Image: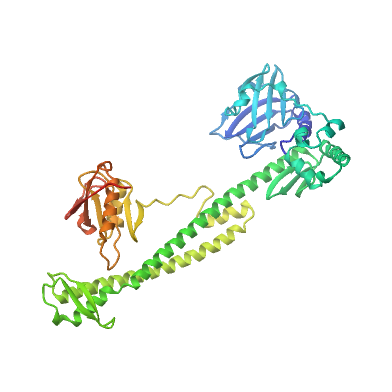
Amino acid sequence: MHNNHFFLRQLIVPLQKTLTGTVVSECYSQNKDELIIRFETKGDPYFVKASLLSSFSCLSFPETFHRARKNSADLFGNLIGQRVARIFVFENERSFAIAFGNNITLLFKLHGNRSNIILFKDDTIDELFKNNILEDETLKLEQLHRSIDWSYENFAQHQHDLPTVYFTFGKWVWRYLNEQGFNAKTLDERWTAIQNLLQDLNDPSYYVTEADGKIVFSLLATGKITKTFGDPIAAINDFFLTYSQQDTLGREKSSLLSTLKAKLQATENYYAKTREKLEELQGDNNYKTWADLIMAHLHAIKPGTERVTLPNFYQENHPTEIKLKKDLSPQKNAEVFYKKSKKQQLEMQRLHEILEQKRQEREGLKQQLLEAEALTTIKSLRPFAEGLGWSKEKEKQPKPLPYHETEYHGYRIWVGRNAQANDELTLKYGYKEDLWLHAKDVAGSHVLIKHQAGKNFPKDVIERAAQLAAYHSKRKTDTLCPVVVVPRKFVRKRKGDPAGAVVVDREEVIMVEPRK
């Protein structure tokens, strides 16, 4: 009810007493949707602060206000030097005005998210604080007064449509009446309730109360009352401060919780993917098995053999086919497999360490979430956030990955975002066992198919990645596009080459249709 007509009627009484005869010395804005007016009195200056956010519009009257040296704009220049003649409220309307000499009037229209402050000169609009409210451009002061017939006859005639008849009450007043069982009363009982209500509204106390989890200003004793005032200025100042603090707490706490939850989700996703990769490696001991089988059957393998089938003593002598490098001896082939097996073991050890690290991070984030959810004041929230390494300003976003990821038949395919990202993708994120693809002889994204231990790249996966490489290139509109396909280890960058430019030592070219 901080912008309700019945409150404005009470508010202008002390304002009229304080401001009549004072002179405006400053009128400026240093925050969007906020206006400060300074009045010179015989003693200390008097400040009126209008905060007209779309989410919350409210007046307050700070004892002091220090103007910022920068980012401050003077407004309503025709007000400067004008002396206050009187202050009046419009009949049954959420608006009041300060009248000055020289037929100048400053209107405070307090209509929620359509609130505005408008300067009139000779009853014509001279300047608007907000210029984006179209209906305010044609507003006439004399049209703001609205009449209500408070008679019993009118009440009885419109008993089924009272919120429309008594429009100036507002939602909060009708909520209060409904809480008192208004609709269940007889006609005469409801009339009596309205009369009692008007007495309370015309001679009110002022309450800062809580309802539905929000701070509310009320002229009626309802909700969870936290403070009671007899002075409207003190009441609205306390409400504005309390609401602003609660709103700031809500926004900063929501941002903090959102960040913590996002970090927790990212950690859990990373943990799950790492565990999946570890389980895949743990189930893939082919390299060691092949090496053991070769060493056990050296006498049966002829030099220059490309493929050999040997009984697998790890699987009840089930025949196992092994692909060999024909230019290496059987023993050298076994050594190659042992080296790859050792790399697998080292990779599994590394993954175990990552899992433990992520597990600890996950538990830490869960605890931080519990602690953050329990915070109830800005004084406790901000040190907590700073203790996590964050300031109240927006946390810097992590650098995005240099690629978009897609998956096809269980294989991860990475597509570079731009020329600089292409270099990072290929040279930093690519492993020599990955398969590298690029549209031939034109600019385009680098594409990687991530290698899976012990598996060859399926033909359909290669074709799908090639289609992506073609689509993310200058040939995306061609019917068919040649695409280079080569293991990552045969791709290198020469010193001085521009971003995205690489040298391919070996290549195979396939023709595909560009597809997203």
Out of 151 and 487, give the one closest to the viewer. Answer: 151
The answer to whether residue 379 is above or below residue 205 is below
Out of 228 and 359, give the one closest to the viewer. Answer: 359
Question: Could you tell me residue 48's position as x and y percent?
Answer: 68, 33
Q: Is residue 467 left or right of residue 230?
A: left
Give the total number of marks visible in the rendering.
0
What residue sits 74% from the left and 25% below the top?
145
What residue sits 26% from the left and 52% below the top?
466
Question: Could you tell me residue 60's position as x and y percent?
Answer: 69, 37
Out of 246 and 351, give the one closest to the viewer. Answer: 351
> Residue 7's quadrant in the figure?
top right
Out of 51 and 24, give the one closest to the viewer. Answer: 51
Q: Is residue 83 visible?
A: no
Question: Could you tell me residue 421's position as x and y percent?
Answer: 32, 49
Q: Is residue 185 left or right of residue 227?
A: right
- Image quarter of the N terminus: top right
Coloring applied to the structure? rainbow
